[in-house]
Structure formats: C-alpha cells, structure tokens
Amino acid sequence: MEQETLYTLAEVTRTYQVGSATVRALSEATCTIGKGEMVSLEGPSGSGKSTLLLMLGVLETPSSGTLTFKGTDLRKTTDEVRTVLRRDSIGYVFQQFNLIPTLTARENVLLPMVPVAGKNADKQQRAAALLEQVGLEHRISHLPGSLSGGEQQRVAIARALANQPDVIIADEPTGNLDSASAQGIMDLLSRLNEEEHVTIIIATHDPAIAKRTHRHIMMRDGRLLEDQATPTT
Amino acid sequence: MSPFQYIRHELTRRLGRTLTTAFGFAAGVSLVVSIMGVASGLATAQNRLLSPLSTVGTDIIVTRTVGATTTPAASPSPSPGTSGAGTGPQHRQGGFFAGGGSAISSLNAQDQAALLQSNDSVLTDLSKLGPPGTQFTHDFFVPGTLITFPSQAVGNITSIPGVTGAVGVLSLQGVHDTGTVPKIVATFTTGGQTQTVTATPPPLTAAQQAQVRTCLFQQIQSQQGSSPSPSPRQGGTNGPGTGGGFRGGLGGGDFNSVLSKCLPASYLKYQQQVVTPIRTVQQIVNPPQTNLSTKSYTVSGVDPSVRNQGVITAAQVVSGTWFTSSPKDEVLVNQAYATTNSLKVGSAVTLNGTAFKVVGIVAPTLTGNVSDLYFDLSTLQSMATQSGRINEIFVSAKNASEVNAIAAAIHTKLPGAQILTAKSLADGVTGSLADAHTLATSLGTALAIIILLGSFLIAILLTISNVNKRVREIGSLRAMGWSRRRVVQQLLGESVAISVFGGILGILLGFAICAIIDATGPALQATTSGLAVGASSLGSIFGQSSTASAASTVHVTAPLSLPILLLGFGAAVLGGIIAGGIGGWRASRLSPASALRNLG
Ligand SMILES: Nc1ncnc2c1ncn2[C@@H]1O[C@H](COP(=O)(O)OP(=O)(O)OP(=O)(O)O)[C@@H](O)[C@H]1O
Ligand SMILES: [Mg+2]
C-alpha cells in the first residue's frame, strides 16, 4: 500500500583503507527500502551491518555505487545538507544508548530540537509527551546514570523521535539489555512502526529480535545474501 | 532547552572537571595579577625616585650654562678687531639672559659686573688671605658651570601664565682649602689697552701729508723741550701698540697725543676706541709653593620661607627642623654628608670663621643637584660674594599639560636658559636604578607570560582530554543533526564559561595576594649619588664627584588597578577561547561515523 521508496541502493560499496590493505566492509549492495518498513539486518560480526546502517543514517558515504534517500543522491550532498537530513529525517538508537550523562531524560530528548526553530515551551511539552509515549513519564528529570539500561534505551528512542523522523536506525538496540527489556524495546519499536508508520531498520545478532521484523536481510562478508519478507498478519 | 542550559548543566554536573580547570585559570590569573601589581608598585616607586622634580613641588628647573647661545643684540661692546687680550670672560658671558627688548636686558651691565667680580674671587689671589707663609683655612664658593644670574629672573618667570610658583636657588661648589699662603705672588696690571681698529682710510692727499708732517715736526720739537718721561703704565702686559714705527723716542701715550693733534679728523675717529679698565691682579705664578689641600662639597642657598618647593623641601627633613625664623646662622645638612662628617642636629659647621648651627638633617631626592649643605639664600649670597644672584629657578606649573608651553615662554623671555623638565630628567637617567626598573619590568613580564602560557597549556590539555572522553557524545550530537559549527560552539562555550569563572576566582585570589604583599610590604633601599642637571653637574666641572647622595627606602606595594584586573581576566578568557577553540577544532575534525563506531 504505502510502499513509497525511502532508500534506493545500487551496487553500494564501502571500502576502508587499513594500512596497505583495503577492507571491503560493504560490497555492491543493491536493494530498496520503502517507507513504513520494519527491516532487520542479520549476520555474523564483521559482516558489514554497522557499515550499511551508517550509510543509511547519512553518517557515511559510499565509496562507489548510488545511494538515494528520499530522492537525494547522498554521494552528491554537502555536509550541511546531510546534517539537515539527519536532523529532520533520521533517528538513531545505539547499543550503548549514547545519552548525554549530564542532561536529564527530558533534556536529552530536547537535544535534537536545539537546532530546530520553535518555542521552548512547545519543545518542552513535546519532550514530555515523547517520554510518556515510551513509558517514562515518571523519569523525566532523571539523569541517565540513575536509569536502568532498558529505561536509558527508551530515552534514546524518545530522543530519536524528537524531530518526527522518517526512519529509526537502531544498531543492536537490545545488545546491552536482558531479554525482558529487549522485548519491551521491540514492543515499543513495533508499535511506533505500526501506529506512527516510522520506518525501522535494526541490526542484530539475535534471531529473537529479528523475528519481530517484517523483512530480514542476511549479510555475510559485506554482501546482502537473502532478503525475505515475513508476511504480516 | 537552550545551548546555554546545556553548557550550564555540562559545567555544574561535571563539577570536578569544571573546578579543576577553573582553578588552573584562577591560579594563572591571580599570579599574573599580583606580579603586575608588584611591577606597577615598583614602577610607581621608581618613578618617584627617577622623576624627583615632583617630590620637590617642581615641574621645571631653569639654569644657565656656559656655551649657551647668545642673541646678537645682547652682545655688549662691539669692539671690532679686538686683539683678544684680557676680554675673554666678559665676551663669553655677556649675552646670557639678555633677550632683545626684554625687561632684563638692562641688567646686562650688572650681570657682567657681577660675573667679573666672581671671577676675581680670592681663589685666584691667595695673597688676600695674609702675608706669605700664613697658615690658612678658607672656604671658597664658585658657581662652576651653573652660571649665576640676577634673581630678578624669578619675577620674569612668575609672570608667565600657568606658572604657580618660582623660587630661586643658589647652588655652588664649595672648596675647602687649607695650606700656607704662597710666597711667589706676582702683581701685574691688565686692561688699559686701546683696541686697534683695522680699517683702510683714504690715503692722505699730498696737501694733508705736508700738513701732518709740518704739524708733527712742530709738536715733537715742543715736546722734547718739556718732559719726555716714559709712561708707568707700560708694564709687563702691554697690549699691542698702536702705531708701528712712529714710536721712536717717544712714549706711546705722548706720541698718541701728538698724533691726535696732527691727524685729519676722519682719522681720529678710529682712535680712542674701547679702553678696558685697568685692574691690578695678584696671582700665583708657576705652581703654588704651598701645601694646599682641597676638599670640595656642594652648597645651596634656599629661601627659608618657601617650604614646599625648591632644591630641598621641609618634607625632606628627616630629623631636626626646617630653618627657624632666624635662619642666618643655621644650616641643613644632607643625611649622607652628615653621616660621613659625623654631624648631628645641634652640631656646628664653621665656614670662614662663622659657625652655623645644624638645625635639620635632610634626605634630598635625586634632584640632580643634591647639595651637602643648605643655607639661607642671602647668607650664602654674601658668603660667596654673589649678592642678589642665583643660578637655579624651580618653577611649578598649574598643570602638567602646560609645562611645554611654559618652557617655551621661558626660552623666549630668558634666552640662553637651560630648561629641565621632569620628563627630560627622567629620559636622561641611566644607570643601575634605571636598569633595576627595566629588569623588574621585563622580568615581571616574562614571569607573567610564562605563568599565563602554563595555565593556558593546562587548560588546553584538560579541554582536549575532555573532548577525547566525549567522542561518543560528540558523535551522537552530530548524528542527531547538530552541525560541526554547533558542536564547536558548545565546546567553546563550555571552555569560555569555565575561564570566566576561573578569571573571577583569579581576580579574588589576586586581591588576596596583593593585600598580603601590601600588608607585609618588603622594603627596598635605593641609594644613588647626585645626578647631573643636564651637562652642568657642579662636580664634573671640577673633575671631582660630588659627595652628595640620596638614599630612599621604597616599600614594595602591589596596587591593583582596573586595567590590571581586566588584563588578568581577559587573559583567562583568551585562554578559554584558545583551549575551547583547540578542543572544538579536534571535535569538528572527528568523523561522526568513526566516533560512533569506535565506541558505539
Ligand atoms: N573505519 C574502518 N576502518 C577499517 N575497517 C573498518 C572500518 N569500519 C569497519 N571496518 C571493517 O569492515 C568490516 C565490517 O564491519 P561492520 O562494523 O560493518 O561489521 P558488523 O557487521 O557491524 O559487525 P558487528 O556485528 O561486530 O557489529 C569489518 O571487517 C570491520 O573491521
Ligand atoms: Mg556493528
């Protein structure tokens, strides 16, 4: 239905120079990701999952091939354009949460809104609403250090949602969590995908997590191997 | 939330790091502030020593020296074709202070007379002290190169607009001679010469020649008949004669009178020109045959009624008192001179048979012509046969900006005046005191720079280490759409905020340190021998150094001025900007991908 294309990858290759050797982290990846999809990237360590996510997150540019995001060829953009794309269209969730330790939950959620114009009161309200959405209304003024791993990751998801992104990119979001917390995070992401139609791309080792997505991309040695969709009920 | 709040939280919630960095800045600032405070305190103290005019209520000192230019109009007795004998001093000194048309041009004659008188002092004629062989002790006073001038010049200066006070001082070199009146004294006469005029009158016509010849012949014949005795005036030092070959058997004077009767009127005009007065001088010839021993010292005559301006002031009395109401037999003694000569308040100083009571010991500042003894002006004037004469005028101006204009006015009114302002004196000062000042300033500056660089370095290292610790944080900020510029601003803001805090803390610490320095106030001693007033040091003209010296105690203080505090504060903020700038630059060069990958 709303299979509007978000990403188009055509033979996207990323190489890194390590001394005299050239490491191919991503090799001729070709695929499209539509708006509203929930995709998991699976594969052993070093298979290129993080490399692909950085590329999709507009933090890394391809060495060769074509990568378009919302119709923009990312290889032809300036740093300023990429900064604005990241700000307005992409939300990140990391394995390590990456919250600012000196800011409260609410202040962390406010952080992505700082470069955006708008009334402070509206931003404050939105931050509180987002924290409520992730179930942390009672932790609004807590510093990350006083939150559990699962709570911290919820704050990170609320922060990723701050500027109403098209896509949430999550690199092993449950990697540091126990399975109960991990399932809670997956519940939250699934709900965002279903209710808010936010595209979600998750890299994971964990089949239990991958199982919660609708599309599974298997990676090995920098290549996209299988690409199968689980029929939604 | 605003970036400002982020900065605030970053500082308040990482208080340890904030305080560490801030104290680094504060230590730097406080040390710099107190070093500069001490340097400025030293500079002030040394300025006070180096520009001593202000301590004697004076802005300008007016003197008059040998070799100053004279105005042509002032040149007395034109004496064309002078033979050069005997008139030297008069010509050399005649022109001083005799500006064309000025009020004191009329003083010129007196001026010359007084100078001539001082030249004729007993110094050149020891026979005045008694018959040869007499043991004598005598004090002579000579002005040296500080030529005296009539005290009326003080009034001239007082009338210049902007001058608030002018006081005349007579500073002389005292020469204390003891010995035996020498035996070999020659008496000879100088002066009386008729100056010849070099001129070429028209040649005598044949008729005139015949007339003169006839006239001369008649006159000589009539003269030889009467008294042909030679002139007694033709002693040892006769100047050049007037009339070459005509002198024959006649005395010069007789011949002149004969000639003047016979020459045509146009020739007579060239005769009877300047005739210098005949004076008899007794002078030691050859090295004096006497066991003469000489000690020199310096004296000044001051107006006892002027207590706060002049070569010495009442404020410089360190023990005893200023001159009392009867200053005639009183003397003030320089501290250094009193020490070397074991003089105390109440002691007596005897000069040429007169005893002067020491009423006060004084500590003169480096006025350039510090004297050993200070007398009442009129007393010294009569002792030194310098009645009505002075050789220095201490002038005060209404305000410092008028000093140059006043100096120019003095130049116009008193041509040949040597004018010394506080600035010219300070500029001319060299030597250890000036070196110490320079050293203190440069050493202080070097130290301040080293300390500042040190605290900057600490701040930079702390900021860089902070950036390294926050790589992941910086990566996430970039990932959530913060621009490079915004990240740099954040880090810079944090760093500057810390430096502002550190700067304020440093100023408070600096205040405390300076207060401690002021309270303890270590004392420094500064001693120096009298500096020359311009080129006319009294001592140097006699080839002796003056015994006068001045000692001053300086308490080191560390006054804090707004510029110093602002400078310290500004330095801290600059350090914050540099440290934050370097940290931000490193952060901005960080690729967000690798920042996140390495630690995410
Ligand atoms: N900046 C880099 N410089 C050099 N090599 C790199 C760099 N980034 C990634 N690589 C290499 O590229 C390959 C793919 O790495 P990537 O991080 O994408 O793997 P991954 O699938 O995310 O692994 P993991 O499951 O352990 O996170 C690895 O061999 C890695 O060493
Ligand atoms: Mg990875």
Image (cartoon, coloured by chain):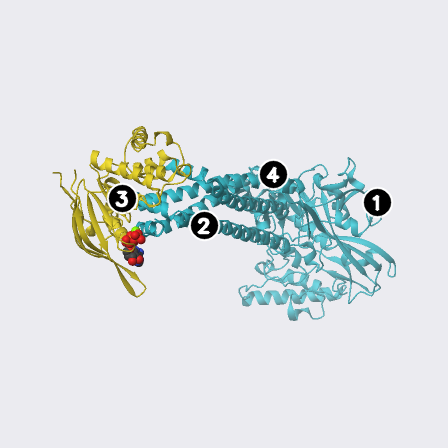
Chain colours: A yellow, B cyan
Name the one closer to the observer, B575 or A211. Answer: A211
Name the one closer to the observer, B473 or A137. Answer: A137
- Chain letter behind tag 4: B
Q: Are marks 3 and 2 in contact (CB under 8 Å)?
A: no
Q: CA distance from mark 3 to mark 4?
A: 105 Å
* In the displayed structure image, the side of residue B34 where residue B571 appears, left or right: left
- Chain letter behind tag 3: A
Q: CA distance from mark 1 to mark 3?
A: 112 Å
Give the residue number, with chain letter if any, for mark 3. Answer: A209
> Callout 3: 10 Å neighbours few (<14), some, many (20+)?
many
- The mark nearer the N terminus, 4 or 2, is 4
Q: Are marks 1 and 3 in contact (CB under 8 Å)?
A: no
- The mark nearer the N terminus, 2 or 1, is 1
Q: Residue at x 28, y 51 (%)?
A: A50
Q: Position of residue B545 (x, y in %)?
A: 71, 57
The answer to which image quadrant residue B186 occupies is bottom right
* In the displayed structure image, the side of residue B62 where residue B126 appears, left or right: right
- The residue most toward the left is A1
Give the residue number, with chain letter if any, for mark 2. Answer: B460
The answer to which image quadrant residue B357 occupies is top right
Which amino acid type is marked by label 2?
Answer: Ile
Which amino acid type is marked by label 3?
Answer: Ile
Q: Are marks 4 and 2 in contact (CB under 8 Å)?
A: no
Query: The N terminus of chain B appears in which quarter of the rendering?
Result: top left
Give the residue number, with chain letter if any, for mark 1. Answer: B347
Give the residue number, with chain letter if any, for mark 4. Answer: B158
Q: Position of residue B599 (x, y in %)?
A: 36, 50
Q: Are marks 1 and 3 on the same chain?
A: no
Q: Position of residue B532 (x, y in %)?
A: 65, 53
